[in-house]
Amino acid sequence: MNDNLPKSKVVVFRNGGVITKTEKCCYKGKFLNIVLNYKYLGVVFNCLLKWNMAHDALAKEEAEAVIIFQSLCNGIPCSTYFNLFDNVVLPILCYGVEIWVYERTECVERV
């Protein structure tokens, strides 16, 4: 297995405060970048475990999918429309729901 160190990032999860300059992470003698947020498998993880960035990214992707979906589905029967919506758009909204579902968010609810 090859390591891709330029693409490797570290998120330090904490209850507040800033990352000090003395906090460093090293792998095979090379320093890794410490970041505040990281997108992994489509879910944005924040160092404070706040899910607002994940909600915003999800709502943006969902809104884009809805716009594309609506432009492609003009003039089809309602039952077919809702069936397609449930199979094409809804999975985007529900992706990672097990992680971020514990907070009510207006941006996701709007979609």
Image: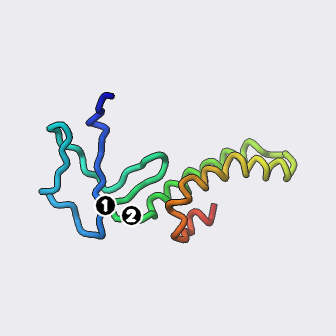
Classed neighbour count for the residue bearing mark 2: other residues with Cα under 10 Å, few (<14), some (14–19), many (≥20): some
Residue 13 is marked as 1
- Tell me what residue is drawn at x 72 percent, y 45 percent: 71
Instruction: Identify which amino acid the numbered label 1 is placed on.
Output: Phe
Label 2 to label 1: alpha-carbon separation? 7 Å
Q: Write the residue at 30% across / 69% down.
A: 15
5 displayed left or right of 84: left
How packed mark 1 is, by other alpha carbons closer than 10 Å (few <14, some 14-19, many 20 or more), is some
83 vs 22, left or right, is: right
Disc 2 and disc 1 in contact, CB within 8 angstroms: yes
Residue hosting label 2: 49
Q: Nearer the viewer, residue 34 or 68?
A: 34
Vertical position of residue 58 compared to residue 4: above or below: below
Q: What element carries label 1?
A: loop
Please name the amino acid that badge 2 sits on.
Leu
Q: Position of residue 18 (x, y in %)?
A: 22, 65
The image shows residue 80 at horizontal and vertical percentages of 83, 47
Query: In the orientation shown, which residue stands out farthest toward the top?
Result: 2
Residue 74 location, x and y as percent? 80, 46
Q: Is residue 50 above or below residue 23?
A: below
User: Which scheme is used to colour this image of the protein?
Assistant: rainbow
Q: Residue furthest left?
A: 22
Between discs 2 and 1, the one toward the N terminus? 1
Say which quadrant the N terminus sits in.
top left
Q: Which residue is at a point 44% across and 59% down the rendered structure image?
A: 53
Left/right of residue 104 with respect to residue 65 in the rendered view: left
* Of the pair 31 and 89, the residue shown nearer to us: 31
Residue at 60 percent of width and 49 percent of height? 64
Q: Is label 2 in a helix, a strand or a loop?
A: loop
x and y percentages locating residue 27 in the rendered image: 20, 41
